[in-house]
Image: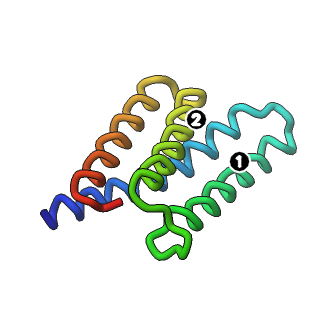
Amino acid sequence: MRVLAAVNDMLALLLEIGALIAIANGVHHSIDQPVLHWIAPVVAVVGVVLLWGRYAAPKSARRLRGPALLGFKACIFAAASLSLLAAAGPIWAATYAALAIIQLAIAAAIDRL
């Protein structure tokens, strides 16, 4: 069980980092104005980091629990999947979404939310 928890934690970390990269890339590709082309991805990533730090970080005083945390993480991962769909195509988006679903299902099953 400890091995499964460790693998799940590593997958969660990779998905979280991937979400930041995917959201930044998706925002970058969706904006045509030269100045906003570089500023908007930074603002989007900072927003996601602040929300994650407040509501999903393990040591946060306001950390969500149970289904609320599952829903929050699912929304962030869905935003990342949509960003990948727009910027990289359906195969990358589907792969990321599948990994996110697997990770969240395992986390729920082993009570790691």
Q: Earlier in the sequence, mark 1 or mark 2?
A: 1
Looking at the picture, tell me which residue is in the foreground, 78 or 37.
Answer: 78
Indicate the amino acid at tag 1: Pro
Dot 1: element: helix
The quadrant of the picture occupied by the N terminus is bottom left
Looking at the picture, tell me which residue is in the foreground, 59 or 86.
Answer: 59
Q: In the visual, does 53 lie left or right of 103?
A: right
Q: Residue furthest left?
A: 1
Instruction: Please name the residue shown 55% across and 43% down the image.
Output: 22
Residue 54: percent from the left, percent from the top? 59, 67
Indicate the amino acid at tag 2: Ser
Q: In the visual, does 27 lie left or right of 7?
A: right
Q: How is the image coloured?
A: rainbow
Residue 85: percent from the left, percent from the top? 53, 28
Residue 5: percent from the left, percent from the top? 22, 62
Occupied quadrant, residue 2: bottom left
Q: In the visual, does 51 lie left or right of 101?
A: right
Instruction: Please name the residue shown 70% across and 39% down the image.
Output: 28
- Give me the disc on residue 104: none
Looking at the picture, tell me which residue is in the foreground, 6 or 90.
Answer: 6
Occupied quadrant, residue 3: bottom left
Dot 2: element: helix
The residue that label 1 is drawn on is 41
The residue that label 2 is drawn on is 83
